[in-house]
Image: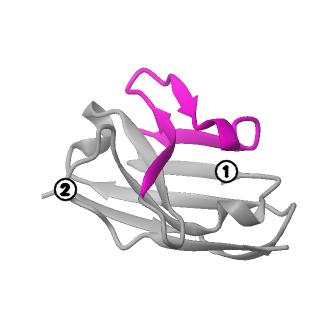
Amino acid sequence: QVQLVESGGGLVQAGGSLRLSCATSGTTLSFDDMGWYRQAPGKQRELVASITVGGTTNYEDSVKGRFTVSRDYAKKLLDLQMNSLKPDDTGVYYCNTVPHSNVWGQGTQVTVSS
């Protein structure tokens, strides 16, 4: 059974940085395209960064140049380095496959203060 455990969120001032990590169990990380999703307050969950099995990355326009997604196959980790954070980046961040499955972790809260 696939399990996803996100960590690394917190409260940070605008302009700061955070690094999120997603620990996976099961075969998800090795054979699936993966992504980070964000659910901002009052909004639907959206895909903000993704990485294919081959390592190709894609980013939502608002995070391009600031976020970097990476994966470690050996450790079954998916990371998201977030720099130059803005208040609009506030939300709960989740990792999942792309397209997403119905299995979600608990997410990790990121709050960026102005």
Instruction: Give the percent coordinates (x, y) of residue 48.
Output: 54, 45
Q: Please, what secondary structure does the residue beneath circle 2 have?
A: loop
Q: In screen coordinates, is 61 left or right of 105?
A: right
Which amino acid type corresponds to the residue marked 2 in the rendered image? Asn
In the image, residue 47 lies in the stretch drawn in magenta? yes
Residue identified by numbered label 1: 81
Q: In this orientation, which residue lies closer to the viewer: 90 or 8?
A: 90
Q: Is residue 6 above or below residue 28?
A: below
Across and down, in percent, residue 32 comes to 29, 34
Q: Nearer the viewer, mark 1 or mark 2?
A: 2
Q: Is residue 41 above or below residue 25?
A: below
Say which element carries label 1: strand
Instruction: Residue at 25%, 44% (x, y): give it.
Output: 28
Tell me, yes or no, whether the highlighted magenta stretch contains residue 68. Answer: yes
Q: Residues within 10 Å of mark 2 (few under 14, many from 20)?
A: few
Marks 1 and 2 in Cβ contact (< 8 Å) = no
Left or right of 82 on screen, residue 59 = left
Figure coloring: one colour
What residue is shown with label 2? 102
Where residue 10 appears, as percent x and y from the top left, is: 65, 77
For badge 1, the amino acid type reads Gln
Residue depicted at x 41% and y 54%: 95
Q: Considering only vertical position in the picture, is 85 above or below 41?
A: above
Task: Give the image quarter of residue 114.
Answer: bottom right
Q: Residue furthest left?
A: 1
Which contiguous range is marked in magenta?
Answer: 45-73
Instruction: Name the mark on residue 113.
Output: none
Q: Of marks 1 and 2, which one's residue comes earlier in the chain?
A: 1
* Residue 94 quadrant: bottom left
Q: Residue visible at 55% across and 39% down?
A: 70
Is 54 or 108 nearer to us in this picture?
108
From the top left corner, tell me how far across and down residue 44 is, in percent. 42, 60
